[in-house]
Image (spheres, rainbow, N blue to C red):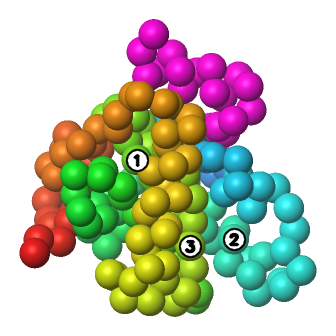
Amino acid sequence: MSILEVLTSKVAHGMLYPLLPKARGSSVRRPMYIAEDLWSLFGTSHPDPVMEGRIGTLRADLESFVDGTALYPGYLFLLSPTKEAVWEIRSTRLDPSIRVLGRFADRDIFIATNYAIRNELGGWESRAWRDAKLKSRTIWTNLFHTYQPVIATDIHKVASGAINGKYFKTH
């Protein structure tokens, strides 16, 4: 069984949800699948109307990955250490800034595992960042068991439509 067959099974069993763009005329160019906790964020109303709007903007930002919009380092970034293959999608148009973490199952197939409010993460070497990355890896393992994500620092090996730039931090 391939990782793509496992992915199809997880969708069929309601453990992952495909993100479909809502914009008229949009289609899926790069599939994104969302884990249960993150998906539930989009399916429930938030009591704070400002945060409700913020969640809508987050979804629109994720849909720009799916619909094939050009990718750039300020949007998609490989977290350190790069060998863990945990990427973040940065939703920064509104405050609070939200980070969606995940991994690539194959080129152009992103599995969004979890999210975090950026100002709650602290510095990039903080315990909160380590916990968020660990949560992403744990969700991945629970979904895909022994299947590994795509491990690459070359953006073009994980996603099409990326402009050239620095998508990860070197030490």
The span from disc 2 to disc 1 (Cα, nearest Å) is 21 Å
Mark 3 / mark 1, whichever is N-terminal = 1
Quarter of the image where one finds residue 27: top right
Per the rendered image, the range of residues in magenta is: 1-20
Quarter of the image where one finds residue 124: bottom left
Q: Is residue 153 left or right of residue 120?
A: left
Q: Position of residue 35 (x, y in %)?
A: 63, 46
Q: Position of residue 145 (x, y in %)?
A: 48, 30
User: Which residue is disc 3 drawn over?
Assistant: 116
Q: Nearer the viewer, residue 41 or 131?
A: 131
State whether residue 3 is above or below residue 74: above
Label 3 sits on what residue type?
A: Ala
- SS at mark 3 in the image: strand
Q: Residue at x 42, y 15 (%)?
A: 2
User: Which residue is disc 2 drawn over?
Assistant: 55
Label 2 sits on what residue type?
A: Ile
Label 1 sits on what residue type?
A: Arg
Q: Nearer the viewer, residue 15 or 56?
A: 15
The span from disc 3 to disc 2 (Cα, nearest Å) is 12 Å
